[in-house]
Amino acid sequence: MDWLIWLAAGLALALGLAALAARFWSFRAQRPEDYAGKGPAFDIRERLNGPILAEGVIYGPTGRVTSRFVAEMHARWQGDKGEMTERFHYDTGTTQERRWTLRVGEGGRIRAEAPDIIGAGEGVQQGPAVKLCYRIRLPEQAGGHVLDVTDWMYLMENGTIINRSQFRKYGFKVGELVATMREAA
């Protein structure tokens, strides 16, 4: 009977440590304030402006690459209001388009809307980083699922943007995206 108590205590300890790791030492634990005062400063009105080329991979829940893509993007700004179009070309031969409406407010706050986004995405830019959270409805050919997305974009000194996104359903990670974005030639 003592072994059962030890087993339960061990499981409780393991679950507690896993919860602490998820809270304090993970992708989800990042906060925009972690990047305050660091540089270069990432202002999406400057860096996500004009023609942009993105290249990336999408990982499934097991960590294996499930898709690769190249995307052409184009953004235009008038003051704090912007519009960005994206055209993704996947390795399967399919294409996907999205048109974002973006607004930058006080304190670097960002509001983002697109037809496949449920409600509006909310984010903030701070230091060399931008965080954006939203709910997306996948196309029907991808199951039509609604996923919670957390995008982090990091501005590098040479102007390249590294984008890492996690996709979750019911709190469980079901996919991840890693991409580079840079000014198109």
Image (cartoon, rainbow, N blue to C red):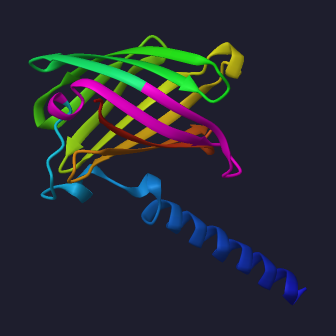
Q: Residue at x 26, y 20 (%)?
A: 75
Q: Residue furthest right?
A: 1
The total of numbered circles placed on residues is 0
Q: Which stretch did the figure color magenta?
A: 45-71
Q: Residue at x 17, y 50 (%)?
A: 127
Q: Where residue 78 sits in the image (x, y, percent)? A: 11, 14
Say above or below: 150 vs 99. below
Say above or below: 45 vs 17. above
Q: Where residue 63 sits in the image (x, y, percent)? A: 66, 52
Q: Residue at x 41, y 19 (%)?
A: 86
Q: Nearer the viewer, residue 104 or 95?
A: 95
Q: Nearer the viewer, residue 180 or 153?
A: 180
Residue 115 magenta: no
Magenta part, dominant SS: strand
Residue 62 magenta: yes
- In the picture, residue 120 is in which quadrant? top left
Q: Where residue 96 sits in the image (x, y, percent)? A: 54, 17
The quarter of the picture where the C terminus appears is top left
In screen coordinates, is 180 left or right of 125?
right
The quarter of the picture where the N terminus appears is bottom right
Q: Residue furthest bottom?
A: 2
Say above or below: 105 vs 65. above
- In the picture, residue 85 is in which quadrant? top left
Q: Nearer the viewer, residue 112 or 179?
A: 179
Q: Residue at x 22, y 41 (%)?
A: 125
- In the picture, residue 44 is in which quadrant? top left
Q: Nearer the viewer, residue 182 or 116?
A: 182
